[in-house]
Image (tube, grey):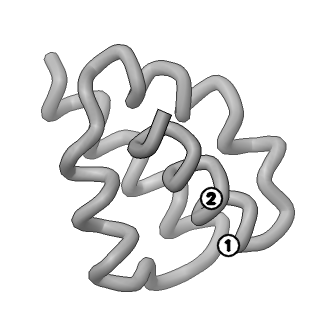
Amino acid sequence: MEEKVRSLVLRLLKRLFGEIAEELLAKIQALSLQQLEALVLVLLDFCVIADLEEWLNCKLIG
């Protein structure tokens, strides 16, 4: 299930922002299922790729 959620997140992000940098992809790969589910709930609120970067930095540090 985790890989299905991760795949969905990546497809949605690519649709929103186009290609995603390798650094961000690596951070997304490191997310737990719970974090991925949280990302699904907020990713449509992101206006720019920097919103994603900030969210990932907060989740991986916190």
Mark 1 Cα within 10 Å, few/some/many (few <14, many 20+)? Answer: some
Vertical side of 47 occupied by 58: above or below: above
What is the spatial separation of the Cα atoms under label 1 and label 2, in whole angstroms?
Answer: 5 Å
Q: Residue furthest front?
A: 62
Q: Which residue is mark 1?
A: 49
Q: Is residue 46 left or right of residue 7?
A: right
Q: Residue at x 59, y 65 (%)?
A: 53
Q: Residue at x 54, y 22 (%)?
A: 38
Q: Residue at x 64, y 24 (%)?
A: 41
Q: Residue 33, image x and y in percent?
A: 27, 20
Vertical side of 2 occupied by 52: above or below: below
Circles 1 and 2 in contact, beta carbons < 8 Å: yes
Mark 2 Cα within 10 Å, few/some/many (few <14, many 20+)? Answer: some
Quarter that holds the N terminus: top left
Q: Quadrant of residue 40?
A: top right
Q: Residue 3, image x and y in percent?
A: 14, 33
Q: Is residue 48 left or right of residue 28?
A: right
From the viewer's side, name the closer residue of 32 and 10. 32
Where residue 52 is drawn, which disc sits there?
Answer: 2
Local SS, label 2: helix
Which residue type does callout 1 highlight? Ile
Local SS, label 1: helix
Q: Residue at x 53, y 59 (%)?
A: 13
Which residue type does callout 2 highlight? Leu
